[in-house]
Image (cartoon, rainbow, N blue to C red):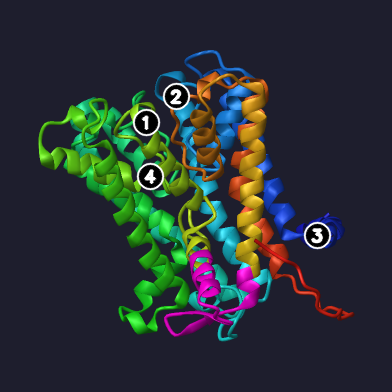
Amino acid sequence: MSSEQRAFRIQAAIRPFSRHLARVPPPLILALLYACAILIGAALLMLPVSQNIPLSWSDAIFTATSAVTVTGLVVFDVGSGLTLFGQTVLLFLIQLGGLGLMTFAVLILAALGLNVGLTGQMYLRDDLNQSSIYQLMMLVRTIFKVVLICELAGAALLAVPFTRAHGFWQGLWEALFHSVSAFNNAGFSTNSNGLISFATDPVVNVVIPLLFITGGIGYVVLHDVARSRRWHRWSLNTKIMLLGTAALILWSVTMFAVLEWHNPRTLGLYDSFAERIAVSWFQGVTPRTAGFNSVDVAAIHDSTAMMFISLMLIGGGPTSTAGGIKVTTFVVMILATTAFFRRQTELHAFGRSIGFDQILKVTALIAISAILVFVAIFLLAATHDGHFLDICFEVASAFGTVGLSRNYTDDLNGFGRAVIIAVMFLGRVGPLTLGFFLATRATPRVRYPKGVIYLG
């Protein structure tokens, strides 16, 4: 049999499978891909070559889910519990989870036919500026280049403090691990106490936040800013994302400093004003996306924990490595609420109108997210003993794929781990899945007369 005949037979065998696959909704494909990555990752972590300590399947599946969903919650110390091979597997899962979501988001836009120049469609349409699959694939390749440059540059800079603390080769590995983890907003650390020992290091305080802010702000925003330096040429999505991110950073850093300034277990550990500001900066920007800690999160005040919960639920930007309901969703919710009290019939910002379909999408996202978080908190509270705030914090961290914890992850039983796994999975895959179905339009065949409902 010639090679051409063999290739023809292979194509003939694959063609029916391809036709069936084409009928599967992209969100279901996304969920299946994530689930397969989690199972394969868990199987690799169960190999003896990956372990320094005995791991159960529950440990492996929880850790693999946390890595693929770029969350960062752990049930054991990955630095001492995993070998170099195991840590490499974990790093690959983090990279796959963070990068995979961005590239799939671009492909979803292409599958939905979101072309440039059509007003009132989904956000990001005018940011991508692509009208064909080929151009979108070129953009995906550009994403790979940006990720590679950012992670390698971050690793090179982080090598300075890490090699000084851990030696040359171990320091290089930890610099690479933390760079990839930071850019993908994973929050995994090979240090048992996180980054507490580097809390006042200037390089760590600059490079790590720069990496996770860049990864969490959204590639389409970076693409828009790189394409033009002028404010008036940026899209509405980019303007809202940049201003919303700046406002949230200013709020979180300032409030963390105010609330924790005299806490003897957090900022009170440092004597100088500059050190307290540096720690406030790092710990103030990390709750929305990354999940790194430079202080003991279990030692923060309850008021600070509540602020962290709100930031974790908001999350980062669309088509980014961050989770949560997204900054743009939060800003549109605020704008819609303000418009209601002002009795405005149209919603607009920066000289652009926001379509009614976008407002419906925001409402659906917030409603579903609130229900998911509430149900998870209820299930954990009903089956676990512990401080209620710690449970709320754990669920918010899992949904926002942040990874911060008040040392409650180790207290989860088998059912609790299953709940957190489900929340991490839905928090990562759910928003894009919901966005796909909301973007599918159906023209109503029947119109009904308006009714009156008394609200509030």
Q: Does the magenta stretch include residue 303?
A: no
Q: Marks 1/3: CA distance?
A: 49 Å
Q: Which mark is residue 297?
A: 1
Q: In the image, is residue 348 part of the stretch drawn in magenta? A: yes
Asked if marks 1 and 2 touch (Cβ < 8 Å), the reply is yes
Instruction: Residue at 42%, 66% (x, y): give it.
Output: 241
Query: Disc 2 to disc 3, how far (Cα)?
Result: 46 Å
Q: In the image, 153: left or right of 446?
A: left
Checking the image for residue 407, the label placed there is: 2
Residues drawn in magenta: 333-359
Q: Is mark 2 on a helix, strand or loop?
A: loop
Q: Nearer the viewer, mark 4 or mark 3?
A: 4
Q: Distance between the residues labelled 4 and 2?
A: 21 Å
Residue labelled with disc 4: 182
Of mark 2 and mark 3, the one earlier in the sequence is: 3
Circle 4: residue type: Ala
Look at label 2 and name its amino acid: Asn
Amino acid found under the numbered disc labelled 1? Val
Q: What residue type is labelled 3?
A: Ser
Disc 2, disc 3: CB below 8 Å?
no
